[in-house]
Amino acid sequence: MKNFKRAKAQAALDWPKDLLSISDLSPQRVREALQLAQRVKEAPGAYQHSLTGCHAVLLFEKPSLRTRLTFEIGMATLGGTASFVDCQHQRIGERESVKDMAKNLERWCSVLVLRTFSHAILEELARNTVIPVINALSDFEHPAQVLADMLTLQQRWEEVQGRKVVYVGDPNNVSNSLMQVCAMLGVHFVLISPAGYAADPVCCERAWRAAEQSGSSVELSHDLGRLFGADAVYTDVWTSMGQESQAEKKRRDFAGYQVTPALMNRAGKKALFLHCLPAHRGEEVVDAVIDGPRSAVYDQAENRLHVHKALLLKALRNA
Ligand code: CP
Ligand code: NVA
């Protein structure tokens, strides 16, 4: 009985095996990851041998600049190694079963970092392997991205609780994770999208539940007037990777939702501008905003590195 209790207590302390959704982390775990990322940023040398002997495999079904490189550089600067497998022309599960792949990979490596079209494939792979799996973007969520976004906001404001973040544009993988992490950390979140483009109900439900706990709010709107009082305005591409056939229609449907200096002014004079990148300049955002003084986009990109290092340390060393 005693052992059982101890095992339960230990499990509560442990970092979860997989990070597939940001909801795999409790608010406390999110804060711990951000603290570790900040420490890693300030003293990278202290961690340079932490993952000696560890090997990451990155399997990506879609292109990437930031995510791929920051996981690769992250492993290298923690003393580990990484292999990149380009799955753009042969998706995971096509050549052999996802289970067989998972069972092979766990014999050679320590952690899997996956970018998939289908979130279900990510879940299937994670279920079938004993090693940690990290979501590097799926059709459903982009949890590693929003941790870097929160680190960026924390660095700018010190405390994010009570601030207001407004996401304008296409409800997608990024906004699905963003609404949840904001709710967990007590940030008021508003998603403004055109009629006909609704946020994912499962993520909304999770975000509303988290907001109840933290005392923040999560609101869905079509009204750009809801920008008023925003401390940060976030947008992402209108056409995510794999949705290229919808680009023309989306350009028409989202025309009024482009982030321009006039739109930023509706938020407030000090509002930051955030974008996960890559940006489709001239579509969801204009140069004057993304290159302007309120833009934090390159800090977000830099913080991907520190956050990924923290996630690797947590997953492999329970740091
Ligand atoms: N933000 C992001 O995930 O960028 P990449 O697609 O370049 O990895
Ligand atoms: N929503 C975008 C994010 C890219 C980082 C996409 O899925 O293409």
Image (tube, rainbow, N blue to C red):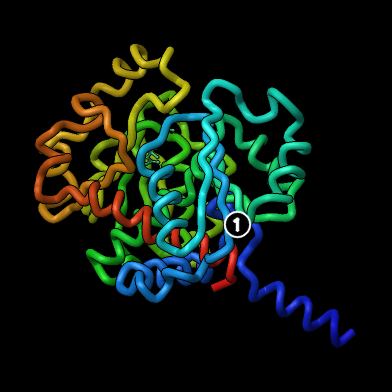
The answer to whether residue 188 is visible is no
**Front in this rendered view, residue 28 or 18:** 18
User: Residue 252, position in %: x, y?
Assistant: 29, 15
The answer to whether residue 287 is visible is yes
Q: In the picture provided, is 109 more to the left or to the right than 218? A: right
User: Residue 179, position in %: x, y?
Assistant: 44, 49
Q: Quadrant of the C terminus?
A: bottom right
User: Residue 216, position in %: x, y?
Assistant: 42, 62
What residue sits right under mark 1 in the picture?
Answer: 24
Is the CB of mark 1 within 8 Å of ligand 1?
Answer: no
Residue at the location (37% across, 55% down)?
305
Residue at the location (25% across, 21% down)?
255
Position of 305 relative to 4 (above/below):
above
Q: Quadrant of ligand 1?
A: top left
* Dot 1: element: helix
**Residue type, label 1:** Asp
Q: Quadrant of the N terminus?
A: bottom right
Q: In the picture provided, is 312 more to the left or to the right than 128? A: left
